[in-house]
Amino acid sequence: MESYERIAIHGLPIVAGLATALSILGPGRAAPVSAARVYGRLGPDAPVAALRVVTLRDTGDGLEPEPCAELVVELRADGRPVDTWRGTSDDAGVAESRLARPAAPADPVVPTSPADAPPATVRVRCGDAQLAEGPLVPRALVWTPAAGWLDGEREGPVRLGVRLPRAVLAPPFPEELLVVALCPECGPDLALRALGEGLSLEDPQATDPASTRAAATAGATHAWHLRASALAPAVALELEARDAAGHGGSWRGELPVTNGAMWLDPDTSAGLVVRAPGPQRRVFVSLLGRDGRLAGLALPLAPDATRFGTARTAPDALPEGALLAVLASDPAESGSGAVAWPLGPATPTLTDPGLDLACDGLPEAQAHEAARRRATRLPFVAVILAAGLAEMLLAVRFARRPPRTPAAEGEELPTTGSRGAAVLAFVGLAVAFAALAAVAMWVAF
């Protein structure tokens, strides 16, 4: 019997170690999880939902894109499919889908709109695996009038005004400014001089105020076009106008700059042309109209003759009714360099052009994987605890056993010191084992 006890005392820690290794490195090891995030910008009256789907994988060390060759995006209402999009996500895990929203119930008396439709949910699958599901909640878009006149310090009888039609400068790309003067007594020789801090400026070009709607509306008597490129994070412009009769005035103010922003060529007749100031590999584009996001694009950037990363689209890439193009280097369009460019003159400005996270399947996938790990590891933890309890009982039993009676003359009794050392050794094993069980439990939970 004693020999079996000795085998158990020495073998139980081995069993516990194997159980711990299997719980962590075997079936209970952490497995990567796949999920999807869905972004959009949907107004209450939008007839379609243009959704950006990002498929990704959580490896435990971070998130990385996971392309999907059989991506299915489904819009559902009242438990039934309304519209389905099928396609693939690219090597960045991005796919652009476009689905029709559920129709509102017909009413012969009161006209209905998409806002009267039943609530919709979006479901994303890759093959047979569901990646995300959640409600698609519309949010009103707040539009404001087109960019107005910039604030600045004015001096002198000649009243100068400055307007930046596209609202922002993106270093180091050029933008055209409109400068107007209100001075009925000034002659046609009124000349404009421009100085810039952190700006590259071209010579002002005089134009007929009547030919420019903004200048004509302001009642300007003189007008100039001025091209400026920001070369610094913060820039300032100083203007001075004077004619031969001595009439003069000045304007000084800061110009709005979005650092790191990608630039959209204002000429969109042949399609969109996007240029990036840095080493970005792709640009994510959202095309917005009055009622929300109309379409989205994910375009690769490659250097061209300008040496900037450039992306181009076909002329028909612009959907009808598009007012703004939001450019960003990340699919969520949440980075500091995200910028909204107007697609035409006098285009209104959207107060908040960012995308909404319609649904995120990652938290649910992570919770499901954590529950699986716990369910798989708990039996191993139970084995470790049972072995630890047995080890402790055997150590106590061995410590309480009386010394053996010498069976033959000359046999020596075991000394108290050796017995004490044995007890300490076994207790030490039990304590170490208990620590192993505690570690296994901590890892499991």
Image (cartoon, helix red, strand yellow):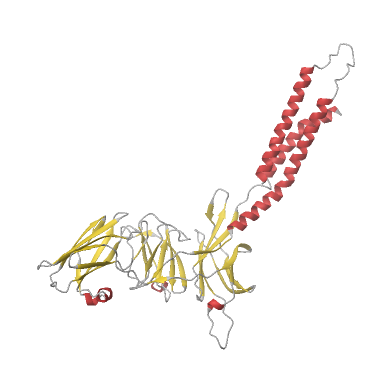
Horizontal and vertical percent for residue 230? 29, 58
Q: Give the x, y percent position of residue 313.
A: 40, 68
Q: Is residue 197 left or right of residue 365?
A: left
Quadrant in the rendering for residue 20? top right
Q: Residue furthest bottom?
A: 108
Q: Position of residue 306 (x, y in %)?
A: 31, 59
Q: Out of 348 and 40, give the one closest to the viewer.
A: 348
Identified at 75% across, 36% down, the residue is 388
Q: Residue furthest left?
A: 245
Q: Nearer the viewer, residue 130 or 80?
A: 80
The answer to whether any part of residue 146 appears in the image is yes
Compared across the picture, whether 400 is left or right of 235 comes to right
> Residue at 55% across / 75% down in the picture?
101
| Residue 125 visible in the picture | no
Answer above or below: position of 430 versus 303. above
Near-viewer residue (416 or 9): 416
Q: If the image is split into quadrants, where does the N terminus sit?
A: top right
Residue at left offset 89%, top offset 11%: 409
Count the labels in the image: 0
Q: In the displayed structure, would residue 283 be above or below residue 425? A: below
Q: Residue furthest top?
A: 410
Residue displayed at 40% across by 60% down: 301
